[in-house]
Every structure is written in C-alpha cells, then in structure tokens.
Amino acid sequence: MCGIVGIIGQKPVVNRLLQGLKRLEYRGYDSAGIAVLGDTSLERRRSPGKIVELEKVIKADPIEGTSGIAHTRWATHGRPSFCNAHPHSSHRVSVVHNGIIENHSELRADLEKKGYIFQSETDTEVIAHLIDSHLTESTLLEAVQASLQQLKGAYALAVLSTEEKTKMVGARLGSPLVVGYGQGEMYLGSDAIALSHLSQKISFLEEGDLVEITRDSATVFNKDFHKVERPVISSEISSEVVDKEGYPHFMLKEIFEQPDVIRRSLQHYLTDSDQLDLNLPFNWADVPKVTLVACGTAYYAGFLAKHWFERFAHVPIEVDIASEFRYRQPPLPAGGLAIFLSQSGETADTLAALRYAKEQKQICLGILNVETSSIAREVDHILPIKAGAEIGVASTKAFMGMVVVLALLLLEASRSKEKIGDTELKQHLLSLRQLPSQLESLLKIRGHLKTLAHQVAQADDVLYLGRGTSYALSLEGALKLKEISYIHAEGYAAGEMKHGPIALIDNTVPIIAIVPKDELYDKAISNVEEAMARDGQVILLSDEKGHHDFSPGIGTNGSSLSDSSSNIERVTLPESTFLTSPLLYTVPIQLLAYEAAVARGEDVDQPRNLAKSVTVE
Ligand code: G6P
C-alpha cells in the first residue's frame, strides 16, 4: 500500500528518495512521485505506473535538492494517474499522505470557496491546501497542527514548505510513521524498511503524534500537543535490498523457504529437551473464550486453527474477519483471549479490532511476522512467526509460519487442558520436527504441478473442495489463485458443494480436491465422486493410501491406482496427521497457484490492485 520517504538534509536527495521508494515497492502501488525543495520553489515529478516510469520522467526533466519527500500511491480516491499521484501541492506546501481523509468533500468545498483550485480527485490534496491556508499567520508546525484538527480519518503525513526550508513536519493517526536519525540529516518513513538504506537509528511515532524534524533534531508532540520523547531504537532491518537469490519470483523463493520457517519456529518455541516454551501470560483454565481476528490469508490460518482448537483442545473459539468484527461490537467476556494474526502487523482493520478487544478487557496476543509493527507494539504478548521479510504480495511463508505457531499453541492448550498426555505430545512434536525435511521432498513435485497448472490456467472458474482443516485450505487455495492469476476461484466445504456450486460444474471446471486420508476422507471422497459424475476435472491431492482407496465410479474399495476415468489427476503427498496435514497440503496449493499465474504471464510478485500492507480500512 502507499509508502512515504522524506529526507531533510545537506546532500542531494533524489536518488536516495528513489532508493527508499524501491524498498517500498513490494507493498503494492500504482503511481509514484517526488518533490524537492529547490532554492525558491518546491519542484515535483510524478508518474502513473512503476518507479521505473518515474525515473524516466526525472531523467527527461531532472530535479535536485537537499530536502525532499517521495511517495508510492495505492489508489483509493481517484484512479492511478499523473494528476492523482502524490506529492500534492498548494502554493507554499507539498504533502505526501498514507490513509484516507473521510471529510475531504466538505473541506474541499470550503477551500474552493476560499479560492483554492484543485488539480486532482484525491482526498490528499485538501491537506496541502488546508495547511497552506493556515500558513499565512503560523509556522509550518502550527499550520499542520491546526489542519489536523479539521481532518477526520487516517493519515501518515510528511510535509515540506518553501516558508521554512530547514524543516519537515510529519504526523500519524491510524497509519504508521517512523523517524530516522542520520549524520546532519533526518528522515521520515512509512516504515523502517523505507529508511533502511539511510539509517538504522529510528523511532516509531505513536497514535496522534506530530513531529518537526530539522537536519539534526526531532521534536515530537503528542495528540494534546505536549512535547514527548519517543525511544530511539536500533532497527534490525538490513540495508541490503532483499534479493530473489536466483529464483524468478519472490513468491517462489518464499515457498521454498518454508522448511526453514518451520525449523526457525520450532527452535524458537521448543527447548533443547523438546518442551514447549511459549511463555504465555495466562492460564488456559482461566480463559472463558478465545476470539481470533485477522484479514486475508491470515484469516484463513485462523479459520484452520478453529477446527483444531474446537475438536482437539475443546476450546471455544470464534474466528472473524477484522473489518466485520470491529463494527459488530461483539460482546466479549472480560479475561477472554483475543488473538490477532497478521504478517505485516499494520493491517488497519486488524489494528482497530485489537483496540476494540483491549477496551473489552481481553488478553491480547499477536501472532505476527513484523515484531516492530503497530500491532506488535499494542498487544500484551507476541508470538513471532519467524518467517523473515515476506516480499511477494501473495502471502505464503507467513501463512505457514502462522499455522506452525497455531499448532504449537494448540498443543500447549491441549496439554494444559489435559486433552493430551506427555506421550501424545511428544509424538506430535516429533511429527512437527520431521516436517521441514518432508516439505523439502514435497517441493520436488513442482514439475508435476506445473503440468497440472497449465490445465488450471485455461479455466475461467476453479473450485477448491475440502472438509475440516482442508476446507480452510480450500479457501486459502482459491484466494491464492485469484490473487495472482486473476482466475475466478471458490473454496467450498466439500459437503456444501451440492447446495450451489455443483450447478457450475462441467468439463471446463477444474476441481482441486484436498482429501488427506483422515477421519473425514470417506465423506470428502463421496463429494469428489459427485463432482466427477458431472464431468468435473478433478485434481485430487491425497496420500498413497487415500489414492489407493479411491477408484472413481467403483467406490472406495481400493482397487487400483490406474484410473478408470480420464477426468482425474492425482497428486501424492506424504501420510499426515491432523496436525501436519494442513502444513503439507499448503505447498501444492501454493505451487499450483504460482505455476498457473506464471503460465498466464502475470506479474506474480506484484499482482494488480493488491497491496502487501493494507493500512486503510
Ligand atoms: C493483504 C495482503 C494479504 C494478507 C492480508 C492481511 O490483503 O495482500 O496477503 O493476507 O493483507 O495482511 P496481514 O499483514 O495482516 O497478514
């Protein structure tokens, strides 16, 4: 989603601003721009499309200065275009903005009455004119502060003015903003990654903060405009740009990193003597209810865990999408456990849901990849997922990391509630320890999936079916395919198929059936039969035993692996338990989506319209 970089300094800034924007590219954007303070004026260059387009614009019409602001925009108000790209400027002011200003129409009407002429369709342009309108009798800091009083919505801002050339003002409410400390220069960024090539010394602004930076100072004010100190910490984000390391896409690299994600997680949460060590700040016996809230892929990780927690730990758990949860105001019993799953830790709806849960006196647990994120700083306890920086917009290794942590949490809950004994716990931990090498072997089926993906890539509609945790995976599989290949796909509970989607099935519809040989196998395989009886083209993911026991059209008598019917393709996975099967079956559904998108020639790492970090609601 939108990204901000700002430098107030003494050396040329344009290249360094562009480098910062490139570090933010992975978040997803559709236009980019830059403004620098020259001797007398603020000069802007902007372009729709990728940063390379902006670079061409700057090459054709160069600018330079020692202070500047830059932005990658993910369109909300107004389509991606030259005019709508940030920075937005008024006479003496230039602004970059992440977030959404909800009362922009009223403000715009007022400003137009005062004679301000708007050049874009954006909500952000009102901020530039508003600040300019306050500037005549105020300093830049005062003008920004006065303007913020009039804004409703969410923002992270960086503001430059020709009136005070040695200052930059920033503010945050609902969208993160970071201050970076350099030698004789200072920075603002939408996250630590944006500044990682400039400084490792950073401080995170808090909600409602306003900051004035000069070349060698940062003065922070809280929401009541009182001067406050925010701790300066050392960022662990490397200044190196994360590399694809020979893989054609980050997504593929991240899929192949999953065995290491599991290894790191087990190393983090298990002692040398294989004891669980989650250091939880509560007793399961005291928890009246568990609520799990997330968005996107993280939501599906949570939905999968619902099945586990209810069935195996007998823990009542509700799982919800953050954008719905936050406005439904669900009653939550005091002392309940609220779990927030998020790769970025910045998703606006998940953050708002967390704040609601805190008001309801829940114990708030974050299962997160970015340990310095906004959610990380507001929860009571973090369980990190140890996936490392995830660049591909379609989440893969972070999903795996979340599911592993949820598996460990499940084991911890089951042991504490005496649903499993020590021997059973040991067996489960052993099966988790074997997973990384199992996954390494499993990744070798990529070639087979590539062939199958060509069939999927031709389709207009694809159906994913599964029961239990495999139902959650079918939702995640369909999401993955939609995100990067733009093929319409639906995940369905296999038993629910006959209540609607069965009407779609014909010989043009691939059906990805996720059917491990578990206690739901017989039920799920009957649903596969129903689909095949209607000419559905089934890709059956199962283990040897599961394939052996399924002979389409004949019944589950285990006759033969050679198919009597031509409308089935089989993908064979290792045997699994209820704990390991979702982790294993995740790999083929990710690879299938990846290969289908590659076969269609799509931009796998930066799919259209999507953002990695969704900081607006
Ligand atoms: C966006 C991303 C998804 C991600 C979702 C939730 O939609 O494109 O990959 O699953 O946000 O993000 P989070 O950072 O909270 O896990």
Image (cartoon, rainbow, N blue to C red):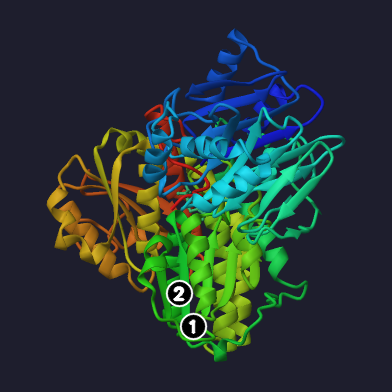
Camera sees residue 252: no
Residue sitting nearer the eye, 367 or 575: 367
Q: Secondary structure at mark 2?
A: helix
Position of 452 with respect to 61 (left or right) is left
Q: Nearer the viewer, residue 27 or 616?
A: 616
Q: Is residue 60 shown above or below 296?
A: above
Label 1 CB sits under 8 Å from any ligand 1 atom: no
Cβ–Cβ below 8 Å for labels 1 and 2? Answer: yes
Q: Is residue 329 left or right of residue 496?
A: right
Within-10-Å neighbours for mark 2: few <14, some 14–19, many 20+? many
Foreground residue among 492 and 571:
492
Q: Which mark is residue 78?
A: none
Residue 326 position (above or below residue 426) = above
User: How many labels sit on residues?
Assistant: 2
Q: Nearer the viewer, residue 284 or 198?
A: 198
Residue 268, percent across and down? 72, 65
**Residue located at (46% from left, 75% from top):** 291
Residue found at the very far right of the displayed protein: 183
In the image, residue 476 above or below residue 190? below
The residue wearing badge 1 is 313
Q: Which residue is mark 2?
A: 308
Q: Amino acid at mark 2?
A: Trp
Q: Residue at x 69, y 45 (%)?
A: 192
Dot 1 or dot 2: first in sequence order is: 2
